[in-house]
Image (spheres, rainbow, N blue to C red):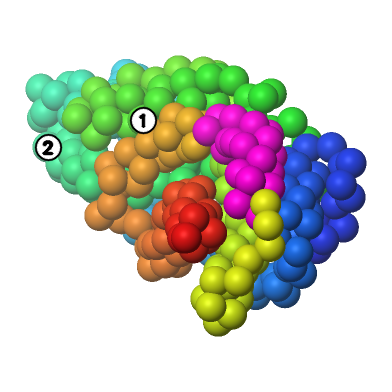
Amino acid sequence: MLSIVLSILLAGCGAEGPEGRFERYTGRLEGALDSERPPAATAERFTPPTPPRPGQLQLDLQGSKLDALDFLALSGCEVQVTIGKRNSSLGRMASPSQRLLLELEYLQLAPACVDRLQARGRETLAALLNEAWQQKRGQLPSLIFNATLAGVEYRDFWNAPARLGDYPAQTSSAVISALESINASARRWLAGDYRFDNLAFELLLSEIATGDGGALLKALALQAQALDVSDRLLVARRDHHLARGFVRNPGEKDILRNVVTRFFIGELQPWMVTVDRRRQSLLPAIRELEALLDAVLPGPYREWREARDAALADYAGAPRRHVASIKLLRAVLEQP
């Protein structure tokens, strides 16, 4: 991932996008306070954690006796076709999403076949099908995890763009609706309703792959890092005044107020409010699915989620910290 420090330092005063507006604000603060900005903080703090690759997250699932079953013995049952598909070479190589749908189809169709076999006195075969049904029902949370949070589409959701451009102006509610739709399906499946729409599910995953989770993290990290530089500039100026016994430059208070009003409140705050609004609308659906599947989340995912949420909390608090820094310096400048 490109260093956010580098992107800020390279952005010129006239650069487009939020990078340029943050650079302009910090530059104006330097002039207003007659001070040089401090060195940027370590890039590590402001580099969002990278999610694990799908291959690191996929859960291994124990096979069942269905894998060796002669599906011809199930003649007359709809589930015969399903078992044939899942035991075929294509079925064994199916994507996690298609594997999930095949198992949902089995869960949906197998009970009727069990009843049919029992009615025909095929108790052993009926017991085998029922045993596999119970196993697949127990594996359902893991199957859903493999197809969603551990899938390539959810990984793509967290990919960050090279530049933010006019983000988040170009976003829509489509990805949020897709996330919520998959959550609703997952809740229904876990409650025992195994109906699904193959094409609709794949289209929802495709929509999620275009989502802006990575752009959101990048925007919040940029905001936090840029404001951190400005915070330390303000604190250094405050400490300078305190060390000199409150000897100040005439008009500094008014100049500071004008810079904050025009560039922080006027230019940056509307963008920051929009980004935070996007955070509040986009992330709950991700967290809802994580909570729904919490029992099966593997260690690497839990570690990344913890780091992600800690970073989000830190980044989202940057505007509040900056306002506090402004107030601290203003309090010194306003002393008689």
- Residue 72 lies within the magenta run: no
Residue under the point 68% across and 57% down: 250
> Looking at the picture, which amino acid does disc 1 mark?
Asn
- Between residue 32 and residue 199, name the one nearer to us: 32
Label 1: how many residues lie within 10 Å, few (<14), some (14-19) or many (20+)?
A: some
Which residue carries the number 2 mark?
A: 123
Which residue carries the number 1 mark?
A: 183
Residue under the point 54% across and 71% down: 246
User: Helix, strand, or loop for circle 2?
Assistant: helix
User: Which segment did they paint magenta?
Assistant: 252-274
Quadrant where the image shows the N terminus = bottom right
Residue under the point 59% across and 20% down: 172
Q: Is residue 83 above or below residue 253?
A: above
The answer to whether residue 145 is visible is yes
- Asked where in the image residue 88 lies, by quadrant, the reply is top right
- Residue 265 lies within the magenta run: yes
Give the mark nearer the N terminus: 2 vs 1: 2
Left or right position of 322 against 190: right
> Looking at the picture, which amino acid does disc 2 mark?
Glu
